[in-house]
Image (cartoon, rainbow, N blue to C red):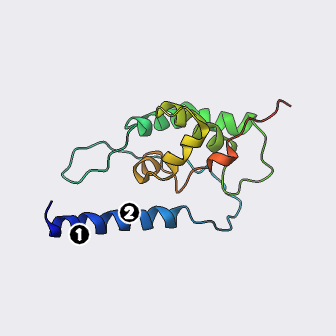
Amino acid sequence: MNKKLRKKYTKTLKRKKREIKKRLERKQWEEQPQPMFTARNIHYEIAEKTQAINCGGIGAIHQMVLKSGLVHEINRQVKLLKSHIPYHESDHVLNIAYNVLCGNIRLEDIELNRQDTGYLNAIGAQRIPDPTTAGIYPSI
């Protein structure tokens, strides 16, 4: 790799790291009217400049989940959170399910998805819950 190409590659990587860091910054969230995972309008295409993810079908899976009403049903029937700042119950449930669908085997692997801009874009989320919040809830 020549110096010019290496410099451009390094600059791009640094910019992408800054973008994900900004996206995951801690901030004071207000009550959210809708779940964080949205992905309303995803398109698959082949282009010269692509953004690939290891679980490329996750956007299609999330659209199916949205259209089936599963998100609404999870939020209607699972009542764990007093307020939705910024996540809804469905965000937490789907976060764990999508972690498994992406081939991850540990809750700690959620951090891999949190750091993946392509994954966040595929599910239409600004951010996803941290792995430390993905514990097992006691039965009520």
Helix, strand or loop status at disc 2:
helix
Q: Decide which of 130, 41 is in the foreground and name it.
A: 130
Q: What residue appears at the point 44 percent right and 47 percent down from the top-left corner? A: 119
> Earlier along the polypeptide chain: callout 2 or callout 1?
1
Residue 35 image position (x, y, % from top left): 62, 49
**How many numbered marks, from 0 up?**
2
Q: Describe residue 47's horizontal placement relative to residue 11 as left or right.
A: left
Task: State which quarter of the image contains the N terminus.
Answer: bottom left
Name the residue carrying label 1: 7
- Identify the residue at image location x=42%, y=54%: 117
**Residue at x-position 39% and y-position 34%:** 57
Q: Secondary structure at mark 1?
A: helix
Q: Is residue 38 above or below residue 96?
A: below
Q: Is residue 114 visible?
A: yes
Q: Nearer the viewer, residue 20 or 31?
A: 20
Which of the pair 41/50 is nearer the observer?
50
The three-letter code of the residue at mark 2 reads Lys
* Mark 1 Cα shell of 10 Å, populated few (<14), some (14-19), many (≥20): few
**Viewer-nearest of discs 2 and 1:** 1
Residue 36 location (% of width, % of height): 58, 51
Residue lying furthest right:
140
Badge 1 amino acid: Lys
Q: Is residue 16 above or below residue 70?
A: below
- The disc placed on residue 112 is none
Name the residue carrying label 2: 16
Which image quadrant for residue 85?
bottom right
Q: Is residue 17 above or below residue 35?
A: below
Cα gap from disc 2 to disc 1, whole angstroms: 14 Å
On screen, residue 118 versus residue 111, left or right, reads: left
**Do callouts 2 and 1 mark residues in contact (Cβ within 8 Å)?**
no
Q: Residue at x 16, y 68 (%)?
A: 3
